[in-house]
Amino acid sequence: AQSVTQLDSQVPVFEEAPVELRCNYSSSVSVYLFWYVQYPNQGLQLLLKYLSGSTLVKGINGFEAEFNKSQTSFHLRKPSVHISDTAEYFCAVRSQGGSEKLVFGKGTKLTVNP
Amino acid sequence: EAGVAQSPRYKIIEKRQSVAFWCNPISGHATLYWYQQILGQGPKLLIQFQNNGVVDDSQLPKDRFSAERLKGVDSTLKIQPAKLEDSAVYLCASSSLPSETQYFGPGTRLLVL
């Protein structure tokens, strides 16, 4: 079985500052990794995903994430945030082969202040 | 391309009542998922359909929850009878194949009083 830990439930930052949202996972098999964003009263939107290849993955809206297998981490970063980035961010994992089920972390609420 | 549609967007019911949610996936998507998202938590998979067959319903509370996808397109999730702890957002998602990206609808926010 897989599990995901998002280490920070809330992250407040100022506009134009860099941000890192942390995600660690646990799995006995190889996994695929995802970051989703959820704006208020909306569904989840895929930001980026790691399936294979380069461990640095670039996504939409200027976000990127780095897969670190030895540390079982997949932290999300953005060099300069905007007010519009205020949202909830979810890290998710899916095993390679077997169940295609996505397992989500509890989410990190990012608040960007002016 | 139209996204995943869900209705209603909001529902308030009393405990022990029944409720049903509807989902229309992206056209051509064979795989459909229902998730439950309790406040402060990430989404949890309730049931996964491949066309009109159930692939995974291991986390569906089958004594009160049921779901169907009779023609392999639209799906309905039902709760009967509802409990207070069922208050949550119910998200529907679809993908062209189980291994492909899941696209989520806006969700139905349920409040059980």
Image (cartoon, rainbow, N blue to C red):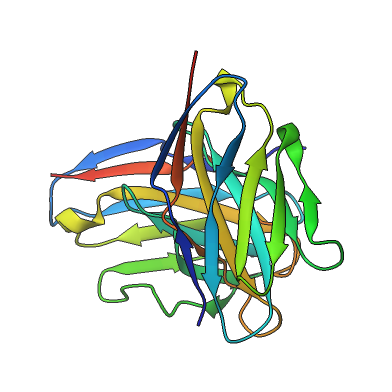
Say which quarter of the image contains residue A17.
Answer: top right
Answer left or right for B112 relative to A25: left
Residue B51, x across and y down, in percent: 66, 69
In the rendering, at what x and y percent does residue A3 appear? 48, 72
Taking depth in this image into account, of A37 and A21 the one nearest to the observer is: A21
- Residue at horizontal 53 percent and vertical 41 percent from the top: A43
Q: Is residue A62 visible?
A: yes
Residue at image position (69%, 32%) is A79
Question: Looking at the image, which residue is at 87% across and 66% down?
Answer: A53
- Quick check: B67 above or below A65? below
Task: For residue B104, say whether it is visible.
Answer: no
Q: Nearer the viewer, residue A105 or B12?
A: A105
User: Percent from the top left, x then y, of residue B30?
Assistant: 71, 64
Instruction: Choose between A13 and A99: the one closer to the eye.
Output: A13
Which residue is painted at 74% across and 49% down in the image?
B27
Q: Is residue A55 above or below residue A65?
A: below
x and y percentages locating residue A71 in the rendered image:
61, 70
